[in-house]
Amino acid sequence: MTIRIIAAYFFMASSAAFAVVTVLGLLRFPDVYTRMHAAAVVLTMSAVLMSIGTAIYVWKFFLSIKIMMIGFFFLFSNPMATHAIARASYKRKIVLPKEYEIDAYSEYLGRDSDEHS
Amino acid sequence: MIIGLAVFFAVLSFIVSYRVVVGPTITDRLIGADTIGIFMSMVMLMIALEYDMFLLVDIVLAYAVLLFIDMLIYAKYFEHGELYK
């Protein structure tokens, strides 16, 4: 077991720790948007760490670059998809506007906050 | 150790399926499905390492792109009520 395999195991174990934090956030957070925040931020970190650990483990040039490209794609795709779902669920009024603490997006859209209730 | 980690991720995605089944709103179900898809792609990456099937890496890349397009189409359909508008 060389130091390269130990580094790969370290990255994979950190990815598993971030995945545990993701599952805890998805199960225990009280609101829709906080749960979405947990699934967007921490899960992206977990996927990128897993791809880095896998690329260190195989240690072949083109295969490692391909696996790193998967992680680089997850780095962009997961926050974009989560942002699209959050925007759609705001437009479809999943959480009622009375329940927001701060509602800056309706001011950005130029409509009154009481209008779409 | 890698196959144990893969089993661990499978158990985690099974726990996340609670949020898909009994989520209060439809947004929770979509986010849970996205999370399960990313966990499954990571499990497929670990299986490719364990059994030396590196064809699975290409399959994981295609799976990630399909998952991304799926989520964008779900979000657009959920926002407008129809796709072509």
Image (spheres, coloured by chain):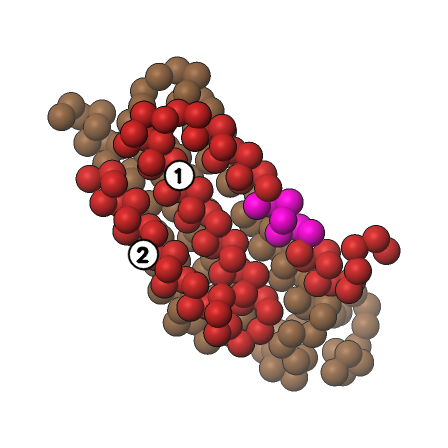
Chain colours: A brown, B red
Classify mark 1: helix, strand or loop: helix
Looking at the rendered structure, whether the residues under marks 1 and 2 are on a common chain is answered as yes
Residue B36 at what x, y percent from top left?
Answer: 45, 54
Residue, disc 1:
B44
At 36% from the left edge and 31% from the top edge, which residue is drawn? B48
Classify mark 2: helix, strand or loop: helix
Q: Chain letter for mark 2, please.
A: B
Task: Please give the count of numbered marks on the rendered protein.
Answer: 2
In this view of the protein, which residue sits in the foreground, B70 or A48?
B70
Q: Is residue A79 above or below residue A34?
A: above
Reply yes or no: does residue B69 show up in magenta: yes
Reply yes or no: does residue A33 show up in magenta: no
In this view of the protein, which residue sits in the foreground, A98 or A49?
A49
Residue B29 at what x, y percent from top left?
Answer: 54, 65
Asked which quadrant contains residue A29, the reply is bottom left
Q: CA distance from mark 1 to mark 2?
A: 14 Å
Q: Is residue A98 above or below residue A16?
A: below
Q: Is residue B51 above or below residue B12?
A: above
Q: Which mark is residue A97?
A: none
The span shown in magenta is B67-73
Residue reaching furthest right? Answer: B85
Residue, disc 2:
B11
Instruction: Name the main secondary structure of what is drawn in magenta.
Output: helix
Type of amino acid under label 1? Met
Rendered-image quadrant of the C terminus of chain B? bottom right
Rendered-image quadrant of the N terminus of chain B? top left
